[in-house]
Image (cartoon, grey):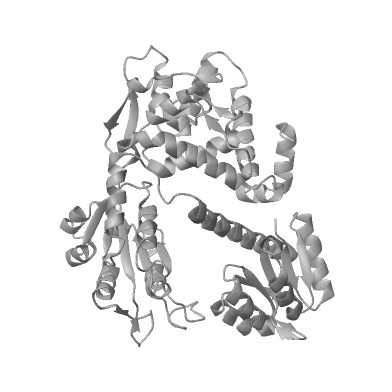
Amino acid sequence: MKPIWIVDDDQSIRFVLEKALLREQLPTRSFSNPRDVLTALSTAADEDGPQILVSDIRMPGGSGLDLLEKVKTKHPGLPVIIMTAFSDLDSAVSAFQGGAFEYLPKPFDLPKAVELIRRAVEESQREEVAEERMAETPEMLGQAPAMQDVFRAIGRLSQSNVTVLITGESGSGKELVARALHKHSPRADGPFVAINTAAIPKDLLESELFGHERGAFTGAQTMRRGRFEQADGGTLFLDEIGDMPFELQTRLLRVLSDGHFYRVGGHSAVKTNVRVIAATHQDLEQRVKDGAFREDLFHRLNVIRLRLPALRERKEDVSMLTRHFLQQSAKQLGVEPKRISDTALTWLEGFGFPGNVRQLENICHWLTVMAPAQVIEPKDLPPEVGVAQVGGRAALPLPAAAVVSTEVASSAPVAVAASVPPVHPIVAAASVLEGWESALEAEAIALLESGQADVWDTLTRRFESRLIQAALASTKGRRIEAAQKLGIGRNTITRKIQELGLE
């Protein structure tokens, strides 16, 4: 791992931070002035450069804010944390406009400082993985005819700036299509900015989209550029557009019409040159009929429509996608990629995948962490796939021909069995319901009916063991961080590891 670079003329600050970070197994390199940092940056190879830069503001021989500006010019993706005394707070806030990740007020609480640096490290690693993924892996995978139609449409739109509406179920890869449309468009050199309009509270969405002026509302300490300004010259991807509040739809329509908008609290029109790509899993025509979506906005967005098929409509792609995601997960976790048997692949191909490609990706990540052997067998698949585990073996091994797709009231596809041998009715039900809770219930019933006396302890130990192993895998073995993610104390996780024999 690349080191954390610490810049401060105060030797005691450098010493305290170095020791605290080394205890967290985070390597460090210290500097007493900005000049030495810039020299080191100019000569260091990529693998020797900093993961994070933590800098004071006021130092002899240079300012931390000047250093921030110069670093961001050459290394725009490098997270920089600015340390500041209370009297420098205004300067620190100003630093955000220069791209600072966060500021750390002095005197600081050491555990909080370490937590902030750890968060910056995780953000940096996520960005590296994302960049690597975009650079080294195919944008999209698919041999099914439905996906080939999507690829052809992307090709036809490659020299166009036209607005596109992508429809498809949740998890089917709508953002990947949007990124591909951007990458193969005349705006490829501009930014790609994505926002999920359903994930942001209604009161904050307007500010997220259009930005706000200083003092526009309580907490607006500085002017903030919205997503439309950030995407200027590039593409703005509006995910789950069907969930946008009705009153904001009017503002969006106006921007799409003439390219002008006002920041929240602003009085001057801002001009932006943005291509909008929208996506939704909802039936927008029905939303228009219900009065929940503006008809004029719908027609403005619905210039070109791309429908993305659900994974159950392209089952011939499951095998290729599974192997791809297993390779990807192994690379992210730094482990040897696992292989999957043909029998286990048959199980996956027979599964309905209500969560689509995203669910398959999550299953592959789960298998990379939880499957005990290098070759994945049906018994290793998670309960949601329908292989109910009773007594360590598959309770209901359905062949692919016995799995069909049906529709329930919620419109979520589920797998159902045809002509299977008689089993306990609750176990049979659990094997076809989605979710690990049903498999847990089936396991409990099987143990209870077998006369086992310590069912509570047995299942609790197995549950806690899997949960802790997953957290440790997620944090690459760092116990304190695993405990924080699980919401338990560091002493608790240490005791549990000993009790469960997970050393």
Using residue 160 as the reference point, say whether residue 137 is left or right of it. Answer: right
Q: Quadrant of residue 352?
A: top left
Residue at the extreme left:
289
| Quadrant where the N terminus is found in the figure | bottom right
Q: Is residue 46 visible?
A: yes
- Placement of 192 over or under 400, stated as above or below: below
| Residue 194, position as x, y percentages in the image | 41, 63
Using residue 291 as the reference point, say whether residue 312 is left or right of it. Answer: right
Q: Is residue 106 visible?
A: no
Residue name at image x 77 percent, y 66 percent: 29
- Placement of 71 over or under 303, stated as above or below: below
| Quadrant where the C terminus is found in the figure | top right
Residue name at image x 31 percent, y 18 percent: 418
Using residue 36 as the reference point, say whether residue 314 is left or right of it. Answer: left
Residue name at image x 52 percent, y 25 percent: 377
Relative depth, front residue between 478 and 125: 125
| Residue 250, position as x, y percentages in the image | 25, 71
| Residue 86, position as x, y percentages in the image | 68, 81
| Residue 202, position as x, y percentages in the image | 37, 65
- Placement of 420 over or under 413, stated as above or below: above
Q: Quadrant of residue 166?
A: bottom left
Relative depth, front residue between 117 and 30: 30
Residue name at image x 58 percent, y 42 percent: 330
* Number of numbered tags placed on the structure image: 0
- Placement of 304 over or under 204, stated as above or below: above
Q: Quadrant of residue 87?
A: bottom right
